[in-house]
Image (tube, rainbow, N blue to C red):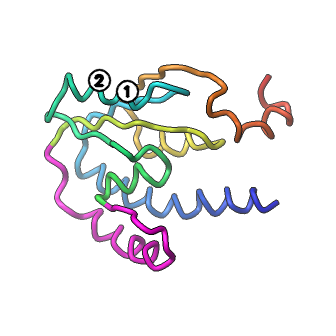
Amino acid sequence: MLRKLKNTLYFLVARYFRYFACIRLARWHPRIVVVTGSNGKTTTLNLIEVQLGKSARYSHGANSSFGIPFDILGLKRKTYSPLEWFILALRAPVNAWKRPYEEKIYVVEADCDRPYEGEFLSLLLQPEVTVWLSCARTHSVNFDASVRAGAFA
């Protein structure tokens, strides 16, 4: 029950930041490339960066339902304290209206370790290209309940 409450609050709070990240994305309007899968995402993101260089912006260190909106909004977490979360929540609406980034391509590493996280991130990013590298059990621990419920084989 505690885990279900935590997951519910996780996406509730993440939606707040996603809302403002959507505003910034709409003003920026980059071509979006998402790199996802069970393993190899960071390596592939780095290989793409070697090819595209400074013509693109990259989501280094930001690959979750919080990290990606924070990256889009230019927000940085350091302590995870309640005060820091409060300050980030206040800065999100302000940062949504900052000048858009200059790069015309945004390459994002998307980690979808939670049920519905892929859907959550796709509503934000709406990528033009998705590079799906692999599908393995590496990050499947959070999906055990879905498998037991018969949602997946």
Q: Quadrant of the N terminus?
A: bottom right
Q: Give the x, y percent position of residue 29.
A: 25, 43
Which residues, given as a range, are shown in magenta? 75-102
* Magenta segment includes 128: no
What residue is pinned by disc 1? 43
Q: Is residue 89 left or right of residue 71?
A: right
User: Image quadrant of residue 48?
Assistant: top left
Q: Give the x, y percent position of residue 139.
A: 62, 34
Depth check: give the residue in front, 42 or 70.
Answer: 42
Q: Secondary structure at mark 2?
A: helix
Depth check: give the residue in front, 19 or 143.
Answer: 143
Report, in whole angstroms, how far the alpha carbon at label 1 lies from the one at label 2: 6 Å
Tag 1 near tag 2, CB within 8 Å: yes
Question: Is residue 42 placed above or below 28 in the rendered structure?
Answer: above
Q: Which mark is residue 9?
A: none
Q: Give the x, y percent position of residue 93.
A: 34, 69
Q: Bin the neighbour count of mark 2 within 10 Å (Cα to Cα): few under 14, some 14-19, many 20 and up.
A: few
In the image, what residue occupies the spot 49% across and 74% down? 81
Q: Is residue 127 left or right of residue 95?
A: right
In the image, what residue occupies the spot 46% across and 72% down? 85
In the image, what residue occupies the spot 71% across and 37% down? 141
What residue is pinned by disc 2? 47
